Image (cartoon, grey):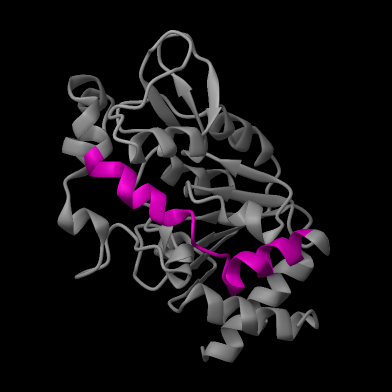
Amino acid sequence: MSSLDKINALADLLRGSKRAFALTGAGISTESGIPDFRSPGTGLWEKINPMEVATVSAFRRDPAAFYRNNLGRWMNFGGARPNAAHKALALLEEKGYLVGVITQNVDSLHHKAGSRKVWEVHGHLRTCHCVACQKSYPMEFLVEQYERGANPPQCTGCKGILRPDVVLFEDPMSEDFFHATQALTGCDLLMVIGSSLQVYPAASLPERAGQLVIINRDPTPWDTRASLVINDSAGKVFTDLLAVLGLA
């Protein structure tokens, strides 16, 4: 099947769907300048071991080291802008082709692109909270403290340590994960975009879909169960898809 044939097939699946969703992973944001986790040579997890620096245990053991290892990478997300794929998903939702987007990403790019229904199953970096009194702060407050030399950043009230509202390794999943699982009831089409489908429990979500489309540069463990697999960049796929749907 040619690339155009695959885009036409994807368009037909969307036209025929009554309850379609997108599930996005780190690969959708690479075109916005955010490295993914597993790509050879550029993947973040080639340079660091997440089980050493991005866990609840690491945060509790040495919060200052936790911030030295993670905050710079997270701060880089703030300057990223939505790319063609993010914008296309927002438009597909607006035009009624999608119910919404479930994302494994914490970069807020779907919100910036205009998507209205977004389930962030691994949390986000817009806010943080005190681990002692649970008071919430904008993430900018934490970053400003860190940049002034306060490491770890602290709550102004009880002086407890602040942590971002992201799901770390060893954390329970966010409420959004359970809301997304419920929302997928009756899902007849799930487009998986830029995800290796190797991080559980998020990688189990395709089980809830009637049909599955995978758009990812590299193979995934779910490819054999998908109705359609497109190994190409998300930006190109969705630019071509909007043209076929007459939305470009």
| Residue 85 position by quadrant | bottom right
| 27 or 129: nearer the viewer | 129
How far across and down, in percent of the image, does residue 55 sit?
Answer: 26, 31
- State the residue at coordinates (52%, 56%): 24
Above or below 92: residue 60:
above
Query: Percent x, y for residue 14?
Result: 72, 67
Task: Locate residue 106, reporting x and y percent.
Answer: 48, 46
Q: Main secondary structure of the magenta part?
A: helix
Which quadrant holds the C terminus? bottom right
The quarter of the displayed image where residue 241 is located: bottom right
Which of these two is toward me, 203 or 63? 63
Q: Is residue 2 visible?
A: yes
Relative depth, front residue between 180 and 160: 160
Q: Which of these two is toward me, 143 or 65?
A: 143
Residue that appears at 29% across and 27% down: 152
82 in the magenta segment: yes
Magenta residue span: 68-93
Left or right of 96 in this view: 178? left
Residue 6 spot, x, y in % from top left = 57, 82
Q: What residue is at 71 percent from the left and 61 percent from the top?
A: 90
In the rendered view, tell whether residue 183 sits above or below residue 109: above
The quadrant where residue 119 appears:
top right
In the image, is residue 40 above or below residue 154?
Answer: below
